[in-house]
Amino acid sequence: MEPELIKFVLTIAYDGTPYAGWQIQKVGLGVQQLVEEALAKLFPSAPRVHSSSRTDTGVHAIGMVVHVEIPKTELRLPDPRLMLAINAFLPLTIRVMSAKRCSASFHARFNATGKQYRYYIWNAPAMNPLLVQRAWHIPKALDIDSMSRAAQKVIGKHDFKSFAGTRSYEMDSTVRTVQKMAIKKEDRLITVIIEGDGFLYKMCRGLVGTLVQVGSGKLDKDSLSTILEARDRTAAGMTAPAHGLVLWKVFYRKGKS
Amino acid sequence: MEPELIKFVLTIAYDGTPYAGWQIQKVGLGVQQLVEEALAKLFPSAPRVHSSSRTDTGVHAIGMVVHVEIPKTELRLPDPRLMLAINAFLPLTIRVMSAKRCSASFHARFNATGKQYRYYIWNAPAMNPLLVQRAWHIPKALDIDSMSRAAQKVIGKHDFKSFAGTRSYEMDSTVRTVQKMAIKKEDRLITVIIEGDGFLYKMCRGLVGTLVQVGSGKLDKDSLSTILEARDRTAAGMTAPAHGLVLWKVFYRKGKS
C-alpha cells in the first residue's frame, strides 16, 4: 500500500547572488538543492520539490512557489511550525516565507496562470552601495517617458521569439501574453514591473535590456514593434544583467493553491 | 602665504554593515577614515572631511553630506571627474554620489537645517533574504494604525530626553523639533520616515523601537506623550537595531550648499 501523502505549497524567497539559479545543477549550487537538503533533514523520505518556475544564475525571488508531498507518517510537526523547521536548515539567503496544505491535485507549475517579475535599475552617476547585487547600475539618465511608451508596445499577445534566449527555440511556441509592463521611478530607482501568462528563457531580461537602450536613445521607442515582428533574437537589444531581476509573484486561480 | 583652498560639498552613501559608524574610531573602521584615505591618494595635503552628521555602527546612509577643502594647486582633475576619482579609491560599500564646489562659507554641519532618516521593518513571519542587514525583522503583525496615531504625538517641538542615548545627556539641550513622522506599509515592508531639525544620539532608533512596541500592543498608543513628559530614557521603549536605519537626506537652505 502506498503511504498517504500530504501536499504542501511553499512560497520561497532567495538572494540569487551565491547560487547557480533555482534548478539543481551539475556544476554549481542550485537553490532547489538546498531546499531539498533541508527537507531531507526533517523527512526521511527526502521529498522532492516541484517549482512553478526556474530562475537563472544570480536572479532573485521573493515569491517562488513550489509544491512538495510529505508522507503523513513523517509529519510530526504541527503545520504552523513547518516553515520555521525548514528555515532552521537553510542559509539566511533562502527563506520559506509560507507553507500550507493544498489540494492533492495542485501543481505549482501546471496550475500557474501567470507571473510577475520586477526589475530594478539604479539610474545615477554612482551606484547605490545599498543596492549592490540588487539593481542594475545605469549611470546616464534614462528617458522614462520613451521607455514607458515603448513598454506599451509589448503589452498583449505576441510572438516573443526575438526576446528569448536560444534555449527556448526548442520549445513548441514562443507566443506569450504580457498583461502588464509598467515603469515606475522613485528618486533614482527605476522599477520595471512585468506580468505575463508565461515567460521564455531570458525574456524579461531581453525586454528590460531593450527598454534601457530605448531610454538611453540607442533604439527608437517604436523599435519594439519592429523587433517583435522580426522574430529573431539578433533584432532585439541587449540582455539586462541577472542581478536586477526578482521573481515577485506567481498567480493561481482562486482556490487553486 | 596660505594656499588658496577650494571647498567642495560631497554627498556620500554607504552600507554601514562592515563599519563602526561614520566617525574615525580608535577601535574599528569608520567610514570617514576610508573617505579621507581615498582623498589622500588624490591630494597630497590629505584633506579632512567635515560631516553634517555622525552615524552609529551598522547604520547606513544614502545622503550623508560633508564638506572638504582642497588646495587649488592640487586640483588637477576637472570637477566632473572628482566623484569618479574618489570612488576609484573606495570600496563598493562606500560611494561618493555627488561632488560639487560650494561657497567658502558653507559648513556641512552648521548650515544643515534638518535631516531625514528612514527606518525599514520587514513585518512577516520569515525574514526577506533580500533585506538582510537592511531592515529589522518583526515576525508578528504590527498594528500600523496604532503606530501612525502614536507617531502623531511625536511631531512638533519636544524635549526628547526620553528618546536619547546616554551620550546626549552631556549636551546643552535635548529639545528638538520633529517635522515629520510618517509610516508607510507596502506589502510586508514598513518604512518609517522621520524628519527633524536635529536628532539626539540614538533618538531615531528609540522612537522606532517604541513605535514597534505600540504596534505590537506592548505599549498604549497614548504612551508616547507620557514618555516624552517623563524626560527619562528608562520611560521609553526599546532601541531599534542599527541595521534598519538609513540617513536619507540632509537639508540646507536654498543656495547654502
Image (cartoon, coloured by chain):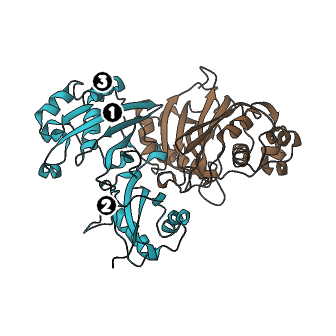
Chain colours: A cyan, B brown
Dots 3, 2 in contact, CB < 8 A: no
Mark 3 → mark 2, Cα distance in angstroms: 34 Å
Q: What residue type is labelled 1?
A: Met
Circle 2 is placed at which residue position? A20
**C-alpha gap between disc 1 and disc 2:** 27 Å
- Seen in the image, is A177 located left or right of residue B227? left
Q: Residue B61 versus residue A100: which sits nearer the camera? A: A100
Q: What residue type is labelled 2?
A: Ala
Extreme-right residue of the structure = B230
Q: Which of marks 3 and 1 is nearer the N terminus?
A: 3
**Between tags 1 and 2, which lies in front?**
1
Task: Tell me the element at label 1.
Answer: strand
Q: Which residue is drawn at 36% across and 42% down?
A: A116
Image quarter of the C terminus of chain B = top right
Specify whether residue A32 is in view: yes
User: Residue A181, labelled with which disc?
Assistant: 1
At label 2, counting other C-alpha atoms closer than 10 Å, the crowd grade (few under 14, some 14-19, many 20 or more) is many
Residue A4: x %, y % from top left: 39, 72
Judging from the image, mark 1 belongs to the subunit labelled A
Residue occupied by mark 3 = A149
Disc 3: host chain? A
Q: How crowded is mark 3: few (under 14 residues within 10 Å), some or many (20 or more)?
A: some
Q: What element carries label 2?
A: loop
Q: What residue type is labelled 3?
A: Arg
The residue marked by circle 2 belongs to what chain? A
Residue B214 drawn above or below residue B52: below
The picture places residue B109, in percent across and down from the top left corner, at 67, 34
